[in-house]
Image (cartoon, helix red, strand yellow):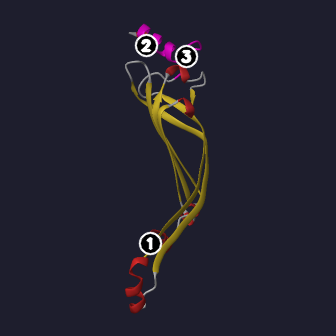
Amino acid sequence: MVSVLLFVTAQLFSLYADNKANQVGDVVTVVLVEEIKGLHEVDVEIDKDAGLSAEHSVSGWTSLISKLKIPLSASFGVKGSNSHSGKGETSRKNVLQGFVSCVVKEVLPNGNLVIEGSREVRINRERGIVEVSGIVRPEDIMPDNTVLSINIADAKIKYIGRGYVSGGTKKGIFHRLIDWIF
């Protein structure tokens, strides 16, 4: 019994063993290196012209028309045009950097690891929460037991900021109502 205990202890703290996460309950550190940029441009120009005209001559009925004092020819026309042009552009850039320790929740049959973790930081009544989950290949885990967020498959990375500063950037109910109406 003592020899088995020594073997297990020696394996856990071996100088030669790989200390990377590989089983349920192990911890792996995710290095967040996310940068997302987006640009959307729209340029629209629409011109429409429409017209209709007609002319009718009534020269065969001249004597009757002259007695009735009706002009010899009648014409009418309708013409319209419509034009519209518009231009819009949106641009967005998000950068997320930092570290989140995640726990291995499941080892898949192919050896990949399902990880999940979160970090909450509070500074001056501001609260920031980062949540990370996804699937990691064991070969993507570096010798220092870290993995880059770009190497997480099916990654779900959320950053939620709450507090006075975060709340100050949101529109009030009156402005949201006006935006909804118009």
Q: Is residue 163 left or right of residue 108?
A: right
Q: Residues within 10 Å of mark 1 (few under 14, many from 20)?
A: few
Specify the amino acid type for callout 3: Asp
Compared with 73, 115 (above or below) is above
Q: Quadrant of residue 44?
A: bottom right
Q: How far separated are the C-alphas under marks 1 and 3?
A: 61 Å
Name the residue furthest top. 3
Compared with 62, 77 (above or below) is above
> Which region shows up in magenta?
3-20
Q: Earlier in the sequence, mark 1 or mark 3?
A: 3
Q: Is residue 19 magenta?
A: yes
Instruction: Please give the name of the residue rendered at 61% of the width and 55% of the height, measured from the top-left corner.
Output: 89
From the image, tell me which residue sits under label 1. Answer: 181
Q: Earlier in the sequence, mark 2 or mark 1?
A: 2
User: Residue 86: where, in percent of width, then height?
Assistant: 58, 61
Front residue of 140/128: it is 140
Specify the amino acid type for callout 2: Leu
Element at label 2: helix
Q: How far separated are the C-alphas under marks 2 and 3?
A: 19 Å
Q: How many marks?
A: 3
Eye-nearest disc, 1 or 3: 1
Element at label 1: helix
From the image, tell me which residue sits under label 2. Answer: 5
User: Residue 49: where, in percent of width, then height?
Assistant: 53, 64
Instruction: Please give the name of the residue rendered at 48% of the width and 74% of the height, measured from the top-left corner.
Output: 77
User: Residue 74: where, in percent of width, then height?
Assistant: 45, 79
Compared with 33, 8 (above or below) is above
Q: Quadrant of residue 166?
A: bottom right
From the image, tell me which residue sits under label 3. Answer: 18
Q: Are marks 2 and 1 in contact (CB under 8 Å)?
A: no
Front residue of 41/76: it is 76
